Structures are given as structure tokens and as C-alpha cells.
Amino acid sequence: MTPKKTNTAFFYAAILVILLVAGATLFLRSSYFTIQNVKIEGLQLIPQTEIERLMDSAKGQNLILIDQEDLRKKLSLHPLVKEVKFSRQFPQTLVAHVTERTPVALVVVPNGVVKVDDQGIFLQRSEGWPDQSYPVINGVTIPDTAGPGQELKIPGLETALLLIKESPQQLLPLIGEVYVNPIQQITLYLTSGVEVRLGEAEDWKNKLEALYQLLNDTGYKSFESGVRYIDFTATKPVIGR
């Protein structure tokens, strides 16, 4: 092929590529991909209307070019939203997959309780007692200025939440109250009324597993009704009646 023919072929190929790119760009930016619908999945605690309001700005934007990170930040302002992922249903639907923050404990405050998650995030304040039961954390003070969505950096609260996190799942329904004293020592009050003195620890797993095994021991069950306290602060647990 002569240099002239080569240059001509290259010129036409370049023009073709430019036209294809321009056409594709115009097509992607066309109203064909304008978001008309939003779907929200994963909600159990959050009313759908609250997330729909936060996503309202997505409608009318381009499904392919929308700034998902900006929208994710906006949804994350909701105190019960832990994580959001997006997917597209072409040509005009954006789907939000929401992971909610779920309460693991209640903190007693004046005239009510505050629900917190496992990271110490302030979720909701209630004047009445919630329908679902959670361990109650006592002995810590939440500032009056704290509100939904705020991470509560309170040493006693962090200690209590670590204990709840490390508890065997089967033990959690048996824990009525977690009391943290001023020097970070913990006492549990079981739903049966038994006081469990745990003291201090950096790792609660061993003590909690030992407690669960004790509560399920047939020998213990034979005199359980007379037990007032179980003391795990000594080398071996002491049962008081």
C-alpha cells in the first residue's frame, strides 16, 4: 500500500472512531437513561418514605453518570443507615441496597432510653419501653447534646458493648441489665434476678462462656431458684444463696 493510500485509510478510520465515540456519548447522555424510578431494598426498621425523600434528587439524573458516592453520603446521614450499595436496572431504574444499623442495647437516660448499635451509634431515643427486648446498659451518662447518628465515645459504654458483642448468642436473652461502675467493673443482672459479678476484663469471652455453661449445668439448675449472685471476680466462680 502506498503512503498516500495509507494516510487516507488512517484518516477515514480516525473519523469513524470519532463518530462512534461521539454517538456513544450522546446516546449515554440521552433521556433514554434518565432515572424515572428508584427502588429501595433491605429495609426493616426504617420507613421507606424516609429513604425515598433522601433519594428524591436522583430522579431526573442520568442512570449511568449519576454520582453514586454523593448519593451514598446523603443516605448515610440517616442514623439507621449503616451501608448503601447501588445497582442499575436499565434503562431508567436505580436500586439502593440498604444495610440498616440494628440496636443491640438500651442505655438508660432521664425520662427514657436510647437505642445504640454495636459501634455505639445513637440510633433513637424513646420515652416508653420498646416492644423488642435488649440488654439495658446502666451506669453511663449520655450527654444531653447527643443525638441520632452520633457515635458515643463513652468508656463505660464501650466496655459494655464489647461484653455484649463477646457474649454467646444464647446468653443474650438471659441478660436483663449490664451495670458499669465508675472504675469500669461490670455486673450483670439476669432476667431471672440473679446478680453476676464479672469485675474487670479485657476479654470477656472466657467468663461469659463459663457463665453460660454454669447456667445450663444440671447441678446448678437443681438449686437455681435459691441463687442470689454468682461471683466471677475470684479464680473460680462463687455462688451465693
Image (cartoon, helix red, strand yellow):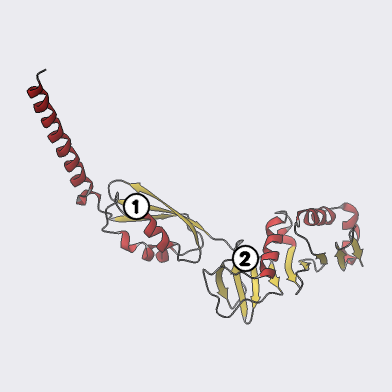
Q: Position of residue 137 (x, y in %)?
A: 69, 70
Q: Residue furthest top?
A: 1
Identify which residue, 41 or 192, lies in the foreground. Answer: 41
In this rendering, the answer to whether 87 lies above or below 215 is above
Numbered disc 2: secondary structure = loop
For marks 2 and 1, the one nearer the N-term is 1
Q: Which mark is residue 94?
A: 1
* Tally of numbered tags: 2
In the displayed structure, does residue 49 sit left or right of residue 7? right
- Where residue 224 sits, quadrant-wise, is bottom right
Three-letter amino acid code of the residue under disc 1: Leu
Numbered disc 1: secondary structure = strand
Taking the spot 16% from the left edge, 38% from the top edge, the residue there is: 18
Q: Nearer the viewer, mark 2 or mark 1?
A: 1
Three-letter amino acid code of the residue under disc 2: Gln
Q: Which mark is residue 132?
A: 2
Residues at circles 2 and 1 in contact by the CB criterion of under 8 Å: no
Q: Residues within 10 Å of mark 2 (few under 14, many from 20)?
A: few
- Classify the position of the N terminus by image quarter: top left
- Classify the position of the C terminus by image quarter: bottom right
In this rendering, the answer to whether 133 lies above or below 4 is below
Q: Position of residue 196 (x, y in %)?
A: 82, 65
In the displayed structure, does residue 160 sit left or right of residue 234? left
Identify which residue, 14 or 162, lies in the foreground. Answer: 14
Q: Position of residue 54 (x, y in %)?
A: 38, 64
- Where residue 112 sits, quadrant-wise, is bottom right
Q: Marks 2 and 1, Cα distance to the nearest angstrom?
A: 33 Å
Taking the spot 71% from the left edge, 59% from the top edge, the residue there is: 172
In the displayed structure, does residue 194 sit left or right of residue 136? right
Q: Which mark is residue 137?
A: none
Identify which residue, 176 or 144, lies in the foreground. Answer: 144
